[in-house]
Every structure is written in C-alpha cells, then in structure tokens.
Image: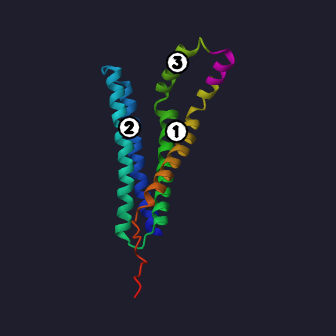
Amino acid sequence: MRQIYNSAATAGLIFAAISISYMFLTQLLGQCTGIPIALNSLITFVLWIAKFIGCILLMKALMSRLVKKNERITNSDTMKFGFVTSLLSALLYAGASFINIEYISTDLMTESYNAMMQVYSKMLDSNSIAALEKMMGKMSYISFFSNLIYCTLYGTILSFILSRNIPQQDPFANYKPQE
C-alpha cells in the first residue's frame, strides 16, 4: 500500500508540472502580440490536445509500471493509485492557479475583465455589473475550487476507466477442464 502512495505522489507531481506548464505557456502565448489570433488559437488547441492525450497515455503507462513493479497489484489498487494521483495533482494545480491569479497575473486578469466589460456592459443592467465586479474579487478562490473539483473528477474517471484493464485479467484463470 505504501508503494501505491509513494508512486502516486510522484505521479501527482508529474501531472501537476504538465498542467502548470500548460497554464503558463498558454498565458504567454496569449500575451504575444506578434502572432495572429487564428495561429495563436491553433497552437493553444494543439497544445491542449497534446496535454489531454499525453495525460491519458501517461496515466496508463504509470499504472502499468506500478503493476510491473509489484505483481500483487490488483485493479482496485490501480484505481486507488489513479485517484490519489489525480487528487494530489489537482491540489497542486489548483494552488498554482490560485497563486497565478492572486499574485502573478493580476494585471492580466484585470485586462481580461475590462475587455469583457467593454463588450458586454451595454447588454447588462447595473445589478449584473455589480455582481460581476463582486465575483472578480473572488476569482482566485473560484478558480482554486473549480480546478480542484474538475481535475479530481477528471482523474478519478480516467483512473476508473483505465484501472479496469490494468492489470489485465485472464478470463480463463480459474478454468479447469473436467477430467
């Protein structure tokens, strides 16, 4: 059991590093004014697809590696591994997102909010604008909890799907031909 938690902690760090790198890379791409918007969107989309598929393949590889290290690992053990991995990764990523919004990229968030208000302010009444301003002050907290929930759910569902076949079960393991 200890091996599962140790491996999950390492895997959580890896997944968090991937997600945090993606967050800052796309943020930097968004600030590049020399890149056309369509190309920027395409690059961001390709990076997201690479992250999405890469995380699935990495989770599968890490689960398989865990099974290779210890042959007594069961499907429920790989599910636990995936859940703990996703929880730790989500916690680290949500914390990085909170720090990014609250301390690092406050100007970027303010600029995004101002741009949004220029577009939508004519369509909103004063109560809606006041609610948006109030929400903007809590955006780092909203981001933290929404990322924590989303990433944990995503990782848990992925773990559930992958753990059903890792380790692979032999359907004929208990078959004994009649003598």
Outermost residue toward the right in this view: 127
Q: Is the Cβ of the residue at disc 2 closer than 8 Å to that at disc 1?
A: no
Mark 2–mark 1 Cα distance, whole angstroms, equals 20 Å
Residue beneath disc 3: 114
> Upstream in the sequence, badge 1 or badge 3?
1
**Tag count in the figure?**
3
Q: Is the Cβ of the residue at disc 2 closer than 8 Å to that at disc 3?
A: no
Q: Give the SS element for disc 3.
A: helix
Answer above or below: position of 138 versus 176: above
> Upstream in the sequence, badge 2 or badge 3?
2
| Magenta stretch: helix, strand or loop mostly | helix
User: Between residues 78 and 119, which one lies in front from this camera angle?
Assistant: 78
Q: Nearer the viewer, mark 2 or mark 3?
A: 2
Residue beneath disc 1: 98
Q: Nearer the viewer, mark 2 or mark 1?
A: 2
Residue beneath disc 2: 48
Q: Which residues are magenta?
A: 124-132
Image quadrant where residue 175 sits:
bottom left
Q: Could you tell me the amino acid type at mark 1?
A: Phe
> Upstream in the sequence, badge 2 or badge 1?
2
Q: Give the SS element for disc 2.
A: helix
Mark 2–mark 3 Cα distance, whole angstroms, equals 26 Å
